Amino acid sequence: MTTTVAQHTPVLPTDANSSDATSTPAAKAAPERHNLLGMSREQMEDFFLSIGEKKFRAAQLMKWIHQEGSDDFAAMTNLSKPLREKLARVAEIRGPAVIYEGTSSDGTRKWVLEVEDGSYVETVLIPAENGKRRTLCVSSQVGCSLDCSFCSTGKQGFQRNLTAAEIIGQVWVAQRSVGPRRDTANRPVTNVVMMGMGEPLLNFDNVVPAMKLMLDDNGYGLSKRRVTLSTSGVVPMIDKLGDEMDVSLAISLHASTDELRNELVPINRKYNIRALLDACHRYLAKCPDNRQVTIEYTLIKDINDQQEHAEQLAALLKELPCKINLIPFNPFPNSGYEKPSRNQVMRFQQWLYDQGYNATVRTTRGEDIDAACGQLVGRVKDRTKRSARYIQSVQLDAD
Ligand code: SAH
Ligand code: SF4
């Protein structure tokens, strides 16, 4: 099946001579306005200074954008009319276009978003604990260069990094669809996991400002324990992340020997398991509070789901403050791998338990709307199925 990619409709300037220019070359040639959506507080302060305005405007704008979900300067009534008009001339608040939105019978919501170049990214909001927790699974890249052998994103290859606006735009869309965040006790998004498409640490310069907006009091105001970055193990960037911020860290381990991990997660050939676990220790040492790393372990039939693997895994993790999250492999066409039986998953969990680990196993949710990052895009673009793993892995037990 092939699908025509919808044309992205730019947000138009509100001033004259552009009213008929929806997607004409003339509109594209117009001077580019600054998209405020992905700007961190510092960047937005610099922007206001650069247009001859006071720094404190940044906090006002951030509240309008991220808490009220506004993209319309005219509605920002605590700004003077001349300032609103000036902003409309030089700036814009441009989020991704919503191509598809669906809600499953269990309340899981999914959006397929079109970003600048016509690529699609997906984001999924998963409610838990009677709706008290709502976890958003966010993508960081279109495709991925790391080519893990069991991952359909890897099979698509790498297309490009998402911009900070496109990353935070996923949170913005989810938040907007639920309503303004005036009532902090009832936030539309309570947790974010960077577990959508892509390797977030290979898009550090855009992922970090976006995560800062998630934490900022004038942004989404999430606690650092409720924002989780998942990585396949880009060791130097784990260190760099630890120097910048202390969000929760999830590691895609999936194997307990270098020999097997080299096959499943090829970046292991560059940064092996020891180097990765050492980086986890260094990261935790920089966190001021008592923190654990989440170890993600995708169980693949007859590959890494035997008793010896569980025992090796337990031995490997002995020194690391961590919790283990088991994710049954989510099959996709021509992957060459199979999902283990339910019984095998339970046996693996028991073997870990025998070694002193209370590992969690994630169950699929939102299936009636294919609710997961990757699946619908998979259908229209590369016909692969990636739903279960996201749904299974997003519910990390961040507090
Ligand atoms: N690139 C990052 C984050 C995105 S992947 C990373 O690799 O950590 C999110 C999680 O889903 C990772 O743990 C990844 O290994 C796992 N995953 C990928 N493909 C999967 C599949 N087909 N079945 C189950 N889990 C999968
Ligand atoms: Fe990339 Fe993560 Fe998939 Fe590996 S598992 S190919 S790092 S998205």
Image (spheres, grey):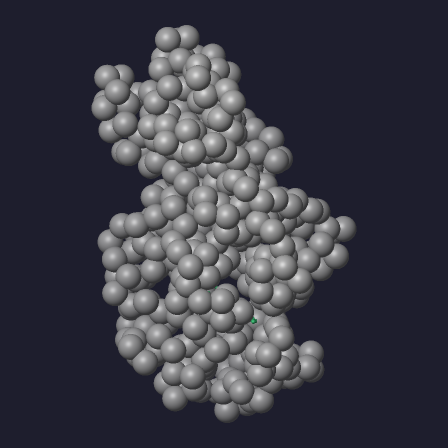
- Choose top left, top right, bottom left or bottom right for residue 390: bottom right
Q: Residue at x 60, y 31 (%)?
A: 179
Residue closer to the observer: 288 or 179 = 179
Q: Residue at x 41, y 19 (%)?
A: 88
Residue 326: percent from the left, percent from the top? 55, 72
Residue furthest front as drawn: 25
- Choose top left, top right, bottom left or bottom right for residue 312: bottom left
Residue closer to the observer: 394 or 120 = 120
Left or right of 267 in this view: 360: right
Residue furthest top as drawn: 81
Residue closer to the observer: 152 or 387 = 152
Query: Is the N terminus in the top left, top right, bottom left or bottom right quadrant?
Result: bottom right
Left or right of 106 in this view: 286: left
Residue furthest bottom as drawn: 308
Above or below, 152 against 305 in this view is above
Residue 85: percent from the left, percent from the top? 40, 13
Can the viewer see residue 189 in this picture? no
Left or right of 273 in this view: 300: right
Q: Residue at x 34, y 44 (%)?
A: 209
Residue 273: percent from the left, percent from the top? 34, 79
Can the viewer see residue 3 in this picture? yes
Residue 100: percent from the left, percent from the top? 64, 46
